[in-house]
Amino acid sequence: MPGPVPEQLGLPIAIGPVGAISGFTVDAYDPAPIDEHAEVPEGFQLSCTRIAKTFSGDLAATSVTQVVMAVTQEGSAGCVAIELIVGSLQGR
């Protein structure tokens, strides 16, 4: 069953090409163990990292990201993240 379409959610629909150019700087990168009592297999690292960024250009904003990361001793890794961005895009 398909989910709601943008019109049903009250979201604007872009017509035609839309583009923006922006860069960012990383203001903070703060890794921390997820749980000191968690039983993590030997050779694995499990962490939660907070990343703060500042965007400049068409996107003038700041963001905070929470990332859960798992890294193996061989160097392979995986992550899940959510980022909150607050600012303006092309002056709006």
Image (spheres, grey):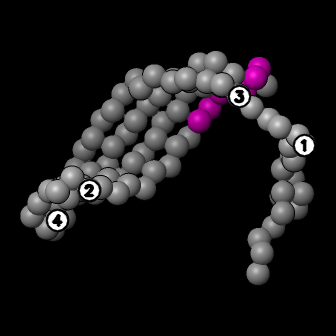
Q: Is residue 45 left or right of residue 61?
A: left
Residue 40: give its label. Answer: 4
Q: Residue at x 25, y 44 (%)?
A: 32
Q: Tag 4's secondary structure?
A: loop
Q: CA distance from mark 1 to mark 2?
A: 40 Å
Q: Earlier in the sequence, mark 1 or mark 4?
A: 1
Question: Viewer-proximal residue, 70 or 16?
Answer: 16
Query: On the image, numbered disc 3 is attached to which residue?
Result: 20
Q: Earlier in the sequence, mark 1 or mark 3?
A: 1
Q: Tag 1's secondary structure?
A: loop
Q: Amino acid at mark 4?
A: Val
Query: On the image, numbered disc 1 is attached to which residue?
Result: 15
Magenta residue span: 85-91
Query: On the image, numbered disc 2 is attached to which residue?
Result: 76
Q: Amino acid at mark 2?
A: Ser
Q: Amino acid at mark 3?
A: Ala
Q: Earlier in the sequence, mark 2 or mark 4?
A: 4
Q: Tag 2's secondary structure?
A: loop
Q: Are discs 3 and 2 less than 8 Å apart at CB?
A: no
- Was residue 90 drawn as part of the magenta stretch in this picture? yes
Q: CA distance from mark 3 to mark 2?
A: 32 Å
Name the spot of residue 25 as percent of width and height, x first: 45, 22
Q: CA distance from mark 2 to mark 4?
A: 16 Å
Q: Mark 3: few, some, or many residues within 10 Å (few <14, many ≥20)?
A: few
Q: CA distance from mark 1 to mark 4?
A: 49 Å
